[in-house]
Image: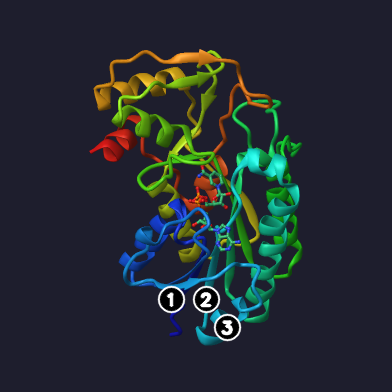
Amino acid sequence: MTEYKNVLITGGAGFIGSHLGDLLIENGYNVFVVDNLSSGNGHNLNAKAKFYNLNINSIDLENIFKENKIDYVFHFAAQASVSFSTKNPTEDATENILGSINVLKFSKKYAVKKFITSSTAAVYGVPKYLPVDENHTTTCLSFYGLSKLTMEKYTELFGIDYLIFRFANVYGPRQSAHGEAGVVAIFADKMKQNKEIIIHGDGEQTRDFVYVSDIAEVCLCAIQSELKNEIINVSTDKAISINRLFELMAEKYCYKKTPSYTQARFGDIKHSILDNKKCNELLGITPATSVESGLEALVG
Ligand SMILES: NC(=O)c1ccc[n+]([C@@H]2O[C@H](COP(=O)([O-])OP(=O)(O)OC[C@H]3O[C@@H](n4cnc5c(N)ncnc54)[C@H](O)[C@@H]3O)[C@@H](O)[C@H]2O)c1
């Protein structure tokens, strides 16, 4: 029986991609990583992964497919900052649309079995109902959301087997606290250094926080299952307010300062929860780590 064991992860030196790399290697897969280290870090890489320091836009990307019989591609490399996309729409589109097309092109040419890519809750815009399911309209509020949505459309039209995952707010070890980081990484960084914390808005806005190891488990299922050509939310389907998150984290880090509040950021959505029934029905798995347990694992 042919074994399909070679997996390419674009963005595999980043936060989510590196956790997936570890899990795949633990499960006996050969992992190849393409990353230009623009926001990722070489320290995140598993020693058993074969690393190519390359931009996904490069024509040299083809050599990786030529040299290694790639069975599955996880396409995670992206410009992932909303504010960067607002100021630099050309660069955002170059990475997220043209870069994705380059990865899709070689994935098709070298007949990968499945192309799995990471999209985002940002494609939905302001929720018309909660929790937001995959049939919700897509009215992006940022160029980042739009470039991700466009990447989804190219994926659907490319004529290869695919899965598109729309991730909720992912958190966990290795998430950078710099740039436009996730709130958990920012709070953790500030609390460790006993620095002031500023919350945008009244803190009662809610988010669906999903632990990074759960994301990696869902991705592993994606290549172990025959499922293809679907768009699937990956989320906990549970809401937690930023104030509550602050309280939980302050307790874990023994942080005694009170946060200060500032104006809500333009375009910030008040409540965001992603429905995860489809993930459960089609892949038989949903992220199960509670925020309490995820923070416990993060803080140690
Ligand atoms: N973290 C989240 O909450 C979240 C939520 C929804 C979707 N996503 C998506 O998941 C994916 C991974 O996100 P992450 O949080 O791990 O971000 P990350 O910044 O840690 O990882 C992205 C990786 O891609 C690399 N990269 C960027 N542009 C590249 C290019 N042109 N060529 C090669 N490598 C390049 C970076 O160096 C980095 O290692 C992204 O596509 C992001 O849009 C993340």
Residue, disc 1: 5
Q: State the CA–CA distance, disc 3 to disc 1.
A: 18 Å
Q: Is residue 152 visible?
A: no
Asked whether residue 132 is in view, the answer is yes
Local secondary structure at mark 1? loop
- Residue 181 vertical position relative to residue 15 in the rendered view, above or below: above
- Helix or strand or loop: what does disc 3 sit on? helix
Left or right of 298, for residue 234: right
Q: Residues within 10 Å of mark 2 (few under 14, many from 20)?
A: many
Is label 2 in a helix, a strand or a loop? loop
Question: Which amino acid, mark 2?
Answer: Asp
* Dot 3 amino acid type: Asn
- Say whether disc 1 or disc 2 marks the residue closer to the N-terminus: 1
Disc 3 target residue? 63
Q: Please identify, in this view, whether the residue under mark 3 or under mark 2 is nearer the observer.
A: 3
* Residue occupied by mark 2: 71
What residue sits 62% from the left and 26% below the top? 130
Kindly check if marks 1 and 2 are in contact, taking CB atoms under 8 A apart as contact: yes
Q: Residue at x 69, y 37 (%)?
A: 124
The quarter of the displayed image where residue 60 is located:
bottom right
